[in-house]
C-alpha cells in the first residue's frame, strides 16, 4: 500500500523549545537587532563583520541546541508515512532528529556560500565564518541565508511538494513571512490541514483546517497519537 504523503511546514516555534530564539515574538531577535543592519544584502555590503558576527552567534547557538520532542515526533511519522518537511528555519534540528526529506526555504545556518557564485555552497564544521574565509574562486564566504529582499530559490519546489500533500501540518509559524506563508493556500481544499501554534489565528476561510492551540511539542504529542484515526477513520 502506498504511503500517504504528509507535508510538515515548520517555523520558528518549532525550534523555540530547543532554546533557539525566535525572530518575531516578544523578546525575539528583531527586538535586539534591526533587520536592515544584519539581514539584508545592503547590510552585508555596509558592514560584513557585523553580519558575520550575528550569524556566527546564531550558528553557535544552533550547535549547542538539541532537537526537541516535536522534531522527534515529526521524524517518527516516517515509519508509516511519506514525510516531507518544508521549513522556514535555518537550523538543522529536523535533520538531527532523523527527518530524511527537509527543504529549507530561508537557507541553512550550518553552510556558507560564495559571494560571487550562489551555487558554491560549503558545509561548516565549526561555528564561525571570518572575514578572509574564501571560496574556491577566492571570494569572501557569506552565510548561506536568504536575506530580506532576496529571492527564495526553493519556493517553486516547496509549492510543488505542497500541491502533492495528502495531509498538511503547519507548526510554529506566524504565517506572516511571505512568500512562504502562501503555502497553506496552495494545499488542495479536500486535504486535511492541521495548525499547531499557541497563538490566535483567524483562518476560518481555510477548508478542512483543525487548529491545535499548543506549543510544537504538546501539539505534536496530540497530533501524532491521533493522526491515523483522524485522517483515515
Image: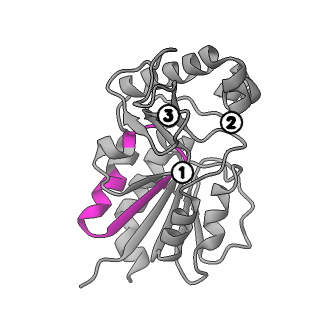
Direction from residue 3 to residue 28 in the image, left or right:
right
Q: Is the N terminus in the top left, top right, bottom left or bottom right quadrant?
A: bottom left
- Decide if residue 205 is on the left or right side of residue 195: right
Chain-order first, disc 2 or disc 3? 2
Of pointers 3 and 1, the one earlier in the residue sequence: 1
> Quadrant location of the C terminus?
bottom left
Check the image and report above or below for 233 versus 115: below
Disc 3 versus disc 1: nearer the observer: 3
- Tell which circle, 1 or 2, labels the residue nearer the N-terminal end: 2
Q: CA distance from mark 3 to mark 1?
A: 18 Å
Give the residue drawn at x 62%, y 66%.
Answer: 184
Q: From what the image shows, is residue 73 above or below residue 194?
A: above
Q: Reply above or below: 66 against 195.
A: above
Please provide percent x and percent y for residue 36. 76, 28
Find out whether residue 150 is within the magenta segment.
Answer: no
Instruction: Please identify, in this view, whether the residue under mark 1 or under mark 2 is nearer the observer.
Output: 1
Judge left or right: residue 33 versus residue 139: right
The image quarter containing residue 32 is: top right
Residue 208 is situated, as x and y percent measured from the top left of the image, at: 59, 77
Q: Which residues are magenta?
A: 73-93
Q: Quadrant of residue 145?
A: top right
Q: What residue is pinned by disc 1?
A: 105
Distance between mark 2 and mark 3 Cα atoms:
28 Å
Q: Is residue 89 covered in magenta?
A: yes
Residue receiving disc 3: 114
**Location of residue 136 in the rendering, given as x and y in whole percent from the top left corner:** 39, 30
Kindly identify the residue that appears in the image at 67 percent across and 53 percent down.
175
Residue named by callout 2: 24
Amino acid at each position: 500500500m502506498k504511503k500517504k504523503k504528509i507535508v510538515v511546514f515548520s517555523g520558528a516555534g518549532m525550534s523555540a523549545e530547543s532554546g533557539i530564539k525566535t525572530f518575531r515574538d516578544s523578546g525575539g531577535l528583531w527586538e535586539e537587532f534591526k533587520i536592515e543592519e544584519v539581514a539584508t544584502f545592503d547590510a552585508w555590503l555596509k558592514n560584513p563583520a557585523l553580519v558575520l558576527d550575528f550569524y556566527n552567534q546564531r550558528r553557535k547557538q544552533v550547535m549547542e541546541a538539541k532537537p526537541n520532542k516535536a522534531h522527534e515526533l515529526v521524524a517518527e511519522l516516517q515509519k508509516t508515512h511519506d514525510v516531507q518537511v518544508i521549513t522556514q528555519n535555518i537550523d538543522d534540528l529536523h535533520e538531527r532528529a532523523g527527518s530524511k526529506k527537509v527543504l529549507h526555504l530561508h537557507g541553512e545556518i550550518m553552510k556558507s556560500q560564495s559571494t560571487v557564485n550562489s551555487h558554491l555552497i560549503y558545509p561548516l564544521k565549526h561555528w564561525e565564518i571570518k572575514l578572509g574565509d574564501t571560496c574556491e574562486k577566492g571570494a569572501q564566504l557569506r552565510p548561506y541565508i536568504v536575506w530580506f529582499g532576496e529571492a527564495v530559490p526553493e519556493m517553486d519546489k516547496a509549492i510543488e511538494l505542497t500541491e502533492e500533500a495528502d495531509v498538511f501540518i503547519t507548526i510554529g509559524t506566524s504565517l506572516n513571512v511571505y512568500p512562504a506563508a502562501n503555502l497553506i493556500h496552495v494545499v488542495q481544499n479536500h486535504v486535511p490541514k492541521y495548525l499547531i501554534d499557541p497563538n490566535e489565528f483567524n483562518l476560518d476561510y481555510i477548508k478542512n483546517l483543525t487548529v491545535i492551540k499548543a506549543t510544537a511539542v504538546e501539539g505534536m504529542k496530540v497530533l501524532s497519537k491521533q493522526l491515523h484515526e483522524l485522517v483515515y477513520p
